[in-house]
Image (cartoon, rainbow, N blue to C red):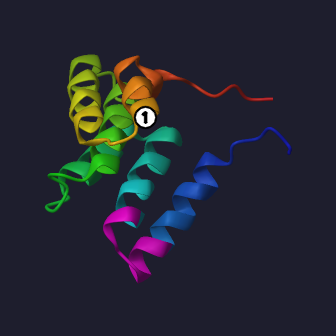
Amino acid sequence: MTGQRFASALAQLYDVLASQAPTLGVLVARAVAHAEAGAPDAALSQLEALTDAGSCQPCWAALARVAWLAGLPGRAAQAAETAAGLSVDPAMRSFLLCGGYKHRPTES
């Protein structure tokens, strides 16, 4: 509606949520929120700390985005390939393999 992305506020919200309900989904979303808010290295550390992410497709997709934002294009591409391999959705596989994780939303 406003075109603003409130990345810092979203990261703070996920910090609070993670302190109360640290589910895998919350922790992955929290890492992406921190990366989008300008802390991709911290987000990468958050994702690397997850121990149950092996076959979690969203975890690998998140790692692709976070690694890209952290300036690690090779690692991002490798994570995207893994995420694509775990996806049952052809559109999601295409998005990941075509580099959709690199997209930077525009600010208004």
Residue farthest to the bottom?
20
Residue 19 position within the rendered picture, expressed as x and y whole percent measured from the top left: 40, 77
Q: Residue 47: x percent and y percent? A: 26, 50
Q: Is residue 59 left or right of residue 19?
A: left
The relative height of residue 96 versus residue 18 in the rendered view (above or below) is above
User: What is the x, y in percent for residue 62?
Assistant: 36, 43
Residue 71 percent coordinates (x, y): 33, 21
Q: Nearer the viewer, residue 106 or 57?
A: 57
Left or right: where 107 falls relative to 43: right
What segment carries the magenta color? 17-25
Q: Give SS at disc 1.
A: helix
Quadrant that contains the N terminus: top right
Residue 98 falls in image quadrant? top left
Residue 84 in view (yes/no): yes
Name which residue lies at 46% across and 67% down: 15
Can residue 42 be seen here? The reply is no
Foreground: 96 or 23? Answer: 96
- Count every numbered label the image shows and give the total: 1
Q: What's the residue at 39%, 51% (across, down)? A: 31
Q: Is residue 68 magenta?
A: no
Magenta-colored segment: predominant secondary structure: helix
Q: Residue at x 53, y 43 (%)?
A: 37
Query: As shown in the figure, which amino acid type bears the numbered disc 1?
Result: Met
User: Split into 4 quadrants, where in the image is the C terminus?
Assistant: top right
On the image, numbered disc 1 is attached to which residue?
92
Nearest the camera: 57 or 4?
A: 57
